[in-house]
Image: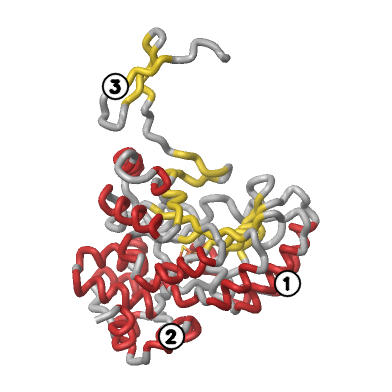
Amino acid sequence: MSFTQFASQMFGVDKSKFKSWLWQMNNQIRDKKSCEKYFKLSPDEQEGFDKLNEIFNFGCSPYYAALIKKVEKESPKRAKSLRSQVLPHIQEAFDNEGVKDPLDEVLHSPVKEVVHLYPDRVAFCVAMLCSVYCRFCYRKRRDDEHIGLHYNRKIIANGVKYIAETPAIKDVLITGGDPFVASDEAIDYLLSQLRAIPHVEIIRFGTRVPVTMPYRITDDLCSVLKKYHPIWLNTHFNCVEELTDDACSSLKLLADAGIPIGNQSVLLKDVNDSYDAMKALCSKLIVNRVRPYYLFYPHLIAGTKHLRVPYKLGLDIIRKLRGKISGYAIPTYVIDTPSGKVPLYHNHILGEDKEDLLLEDLNQEIWREKKALKLS
Ligand code: SF4
């Protein structure tokens, strides 16, 4: 049975309705009772739901719920990689170490929702809504804010004004929340405002909808985006199970619209914390014309400690990927800090021996390379 057949039966609707993104948003699963219609919750998840108002919003698109269910039928172990990303866990209530705003974004916002950290770039957080609320999200603090701030005209006007009055800004990242959880008209309006600013060269989107609600990527949306090139996009696949046929079709629409696509994964326990899991994910991303861009070591945000793994695991995964898959498929492993992204590298330089540079090669043997003795 195809995924769409399975999913539309699970929700008792026809396939075309299931594939409508508006139907998906209107039927987002929002509470324990609705969730129990589709899943047998573990005691930890049940208690997580009971503490929801102390932890983080819950919301899951029917699409992502059906994906969990379908994968679970084939392999409960593999489904864990999806389940732990969205279902609340009681541990979140006990993990009260960590900060709400790890990148000091509020401090770096000269006007509401414009984060100006790097001289030539801003993140413009226009969206409050998401199709799925990820348990590891580093913008959980926005949970406290009001839904009326989603694509709020006044916030957009003030943000556009700030960008227009700041000629150093060449690059605007539209993010949120998820900026594609909005009508084509709202996205078109925002892009028209930003494109009218002569010094804005690049406009980027950060969106998880190809992963969590791929039906949002439509021909009509791509026609809007194409009017405002150069448009770039980063999405956020964390495991290969998320690269379904429907997800891959949405990526094809974007790539065919001339939009370069990058992927930012977060290193997470039981999701992608092994060489095999990352190899499978990154290999399939490049086949779908998506460049694995960053692998983030996750911040310690309140409620996320149980999803973290030792940082050295990420170093080891990247070291093992080198030479095993195309360099295009290997993301840069980073920690995001308030002063920018700091790359974490395995050190292949072992030292120097007279005129030789001593390197650890990919078989973990020593390679001697003659040094240039002086600048030519
Ligand atoms: S889609 Fe992005 S912004 Fe929304 S909850 Fe997930 S990580 Fe956070």
Dot 3 surroundings within 10 Å: few (below 14), some, or many (20 or more)? some
Q: Quadrant of the N terminus?
A: bottom left
Q: Where 180 sits versus 6, above or below?
A: above
Dot 2 surroundings within 10 Å: few (below 14), some, or many (20 or more)? some
| Left or right: 58 in relation to 167 | left
Give the residue furthest to the front: 256
- Picture coordinates of residue 362, whole percent (x, y): 30, 32
Identified by mark 1, the residue type is Lys
Q: Does dot 2 land on a helix, a strand or a loop?
A: loop
Q: For residue 154, which numbered disc appears in the image?
A: 1
| Left or right: 3 in relation to 253 | left
Give the residue furthest to the top: 354
Q: CA distance from mark 3 to mark 1?
A: 60 Å
Q: CA distance from mark 2 to mark 1?
A: 28 Å
Total numbered badges shown on the rendered structure: 3
Closer to us: mark 2 or mark 3? Answer: 3
The residue lying at 64 percent from left, 59 percent from top is 230
Identified by mark 3, the residue type is Ile
* Residue closest to the eye, 127 or 211: 211
Residue that label 2 marks = 27
Q: Quadrant of the C terminus?
A: top right
